[in-house]
Image: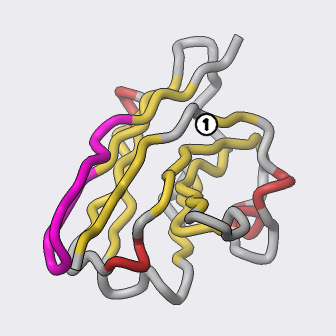
């Protein structure tokens, strides 16, 4: 059974930073996968934030994340990270780690929404106060 476990959420003031981590279980074959971060704010639909293709490291960002958030990975540890800087109140949401198997880096783009992802973590809350 594949498990994704997020950590690192919390409460910060606007302008602050947080670093989220997601660890994939040993049962997950890390290679040839899209792994990424999605979020769902109060009363909003789930949206993609940043995704990385585990083979080669191609990264995709939502427009709202570009220039402020950075996704990275540690292949050996089967972990991904999301460094979030210059946080805004509108970044307040539950952040989820998600993964899917694919042989194409392009499948990690924002064109392919959350419904295409097979594996999900439980989420970690990020709250940004003004």
Picture quarter with the N terminus: top right
Determine whether the residue tagged by mark 1 lies in a helix, strand or loop. Answer: loop
Image coordinates for residue 88, horizontal then vertical, percent = 31, 80
For the image shown, how many numbered marks are present on the structure? 1
Q: Is residue 67 left or right of residue 22?
A: left
Q: Is residue 41 left or right of residue 100?
A: left
Query: Which residue does the image show at 53% across and 59% down from the upper left?
Result: 52
Residue bearing the label numbered 1 = 31
Residue 103 falls within the magenta-colored stretch: no
Residue 83 lies in quadrant: bottom left
Query: Which residue does the image show at 71% across and 34% down from the upper left?
Result: 119
- Placement of 61 over or under 121, stated as above or below: below
- Type of colouring: secondary structure
Image coordinates for residue 100, horizontal then vertical, percent = 74, 43
Depth check: give the residue in front, 31 or 119: 119
Q: Is residue 20 left or right of residue 25?
A: left
Residue 15 falls within the magenta-colored stretch: yes
Query: Which residue does the image show at 28% across and 42% down from the upper left?
Result: 8
Depth check: give the residue in front, 102 or 7: 7
Image coordinates for residue 98, horizontal then vertical, percent = 63, 44
- Placement of 14 over or under 32, stated as above or below: below
- Placement of 9 over or under 26, stated as above or below: below
Picture quarter with the C terminus: bottom left
Image coordinates for residue 22, horizontal then vertical, percent = 42, 37
Range of the magenta residues?
7-19
Residue 77 lies in quadrant: top left
């Amino acid at each position: 059974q594949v498990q994704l476990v997020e950590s690192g959420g919390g409460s910060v003031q606007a302008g602050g930073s947080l670093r989220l981590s997601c660890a994939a279980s040993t049962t997950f074959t890390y290679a040839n996968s899209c792994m990424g971060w999605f979020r769902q704010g109060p009363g909003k639909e789930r949206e993609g934030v940043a995704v990385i293709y585990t083979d080669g490291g191609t990264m995709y960002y939502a427009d709202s994340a570009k220039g402020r958030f950075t996704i990275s990975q540690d292949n050996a540890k089967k972990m991904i990270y999301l460094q979030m800087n210059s946080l805004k109140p509108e970044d307040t949401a539950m952040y989820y780690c998600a993964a899917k198997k694919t042989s194409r880096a392009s499948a990690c783009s924002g064109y392919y929404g959350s419904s295409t992802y097979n594996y999900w973590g439980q989420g970690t809350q990020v709250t940004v106060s003004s």
